[in-house]
Amino acid sequence: MPSFLFQNANVVLDGCTELQQSFNILVTDDRIVAVTRGPIDSEDATVIDVAGKTLMPGLIDAHAHITGLSLSPKNLACPAADLALAATAYLRDSLMAGFTTIREAGGADYTIARLLNNGTIIGPRMFYSGKALTQTGGGADFRTPLEATDPCGHASPFSVMSVIADGVDKVREAAREELRKGASQLKMFVSGGVVFPAEGHPTRYEFSEAELVAAVEEADARGTYVMAHVYTDIGVQRCLKAGIRSIEHGNFMSEETTARIAERDAFLDPTFISLVQRVETADETRLSRVIVDNLQRTIDKGKQVYAWAQRHGVAIAFGTDLWGPEAQHSQLREFEMRIELDTAANVIRSATAINAELLMQKDQLGTISPGAYADILVVDGDPLTDLRVMLQPEKNLRLVMKGGTIYKNELV
């Protein structure tokens, strides 16, 4: 791979709340090898003059779903080719928006990862969960009362995103199967949802404590962790007790429970834009007024939880939870959602260094430092003072590099 020397860059460095002026950065192969204000001698490097623009780490989306055709995850009967095309579009557009890494939260598997890794398709580096684990009648069991099995006679959630598992032994088996197939982490549904609750009654919590512990043990045995879809206070408490690392959503937590996330060295991943986007498309998707009102209440409650998380020093991640290639176009709007909630510097850190630590990739991703992967963006403007810079990639995003390969370059 060629080497690149970025000169005259104002850099987003982890731990700094202001741009650091006039840096030079050397990239060799897929890594950053030097970050300095001094001269760098590298005769073989291609020189790129950043000309005082902002050079920053590639963005990380900690909660993405790439295998949807629409907002509905009930897609088991969709042709595999259509799902593959949708995933391809989602990944390409996500990379061009500046996301050089995503954590896929249910649906993607080794087949898509292989296409990414061998360069057949382009997109962010992907940490995939495989099929999310859900209990019978759980948050990712999308059957109606009339649907007991899929067309092949299997007990199925009618979605490629999840698998039904009941009982400690079945949870262990399902966890081991996703890990066998290369899942980077496990995903579990530990409470009902706010858009697609079980037909019978939305749950306050799901899976027994023994089932949760079993999944955590299986993940830990492979050196990884569990991320949990969970909205309710009691659901989050049970997750933390079981050792789950990543709390996805958590909108109906109490302040006391929110504080426990920091005490347990876990992470909170709010996903505001997915809720907002569903409200905005409610007429088109024929969501009932009851669900729309619940979505709005969920957004408002989430903002309160966000404030509690800041107060108690919780590590706040950056995820979007958007489903389908059309919804993906709102991916950068998660920045828009957080403008009123946090400082620009904190939000950028959530989308870079904090997410990298969540993915167990500290110092490897989400940072401009020697030894890290060369995942680099160059943007016009200063995102540490104005997050709106990130919302117009067609105007402000001038360069995208992932792993030392340039995918977009408007600087030359």
Image (cartoon, grey):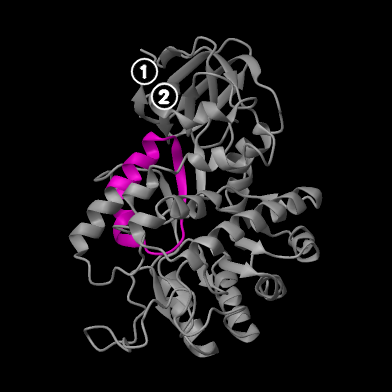
Q: Amino acid under label 2? A: Leu
Looking at the picture, tell me which residue is in the foreground, 288 or 23: 288
Q: Residue at x 25, y 59 (%)?
A: 83
Q: Position of residue 406 (x, y in %)?
A: 36, 28
Do the residues under discs 1 and 2 have CB atoms within 8 angstroms? yes
First in sequence, mark 1 or 2: give its number.
Answer: 2
- Mark 2 lies on residue: 399
Element under disc 1: loop
Say which mark, if any, is on residue 410: 1
Q: Quadrant of residue 79?
A: bottom left
Q: Which residues are magenta?
A: 89-117
Relative horizontal placement of residue 242, taking residue 222 as reference (left or right): right
Q: Is residue 383 above or below residue 363?
A: above
Q: CA distance from mark 1 to mark 2?
A: 6 Å
User: Can residue 406 be found in the magenta stretch?
Assistant: no
Q: Is the residue marked by circle 1 packed among few (<14), some (14-19), or many (20+) residues within 10 Å?
A: few
Q: Residue at x 42, y 72 (%)?
A: 178
Relative horizontal placement of residue 356, taking residue 285 as reference (left or right): right
Q: Is residue 258 above or below residue 149?
A: above
Q: Amino acid under label 1? A: Glu
The quadrant of the rendering that contains the C terminus is top left
The quadrant of the rendering that contains the N terminus is top left
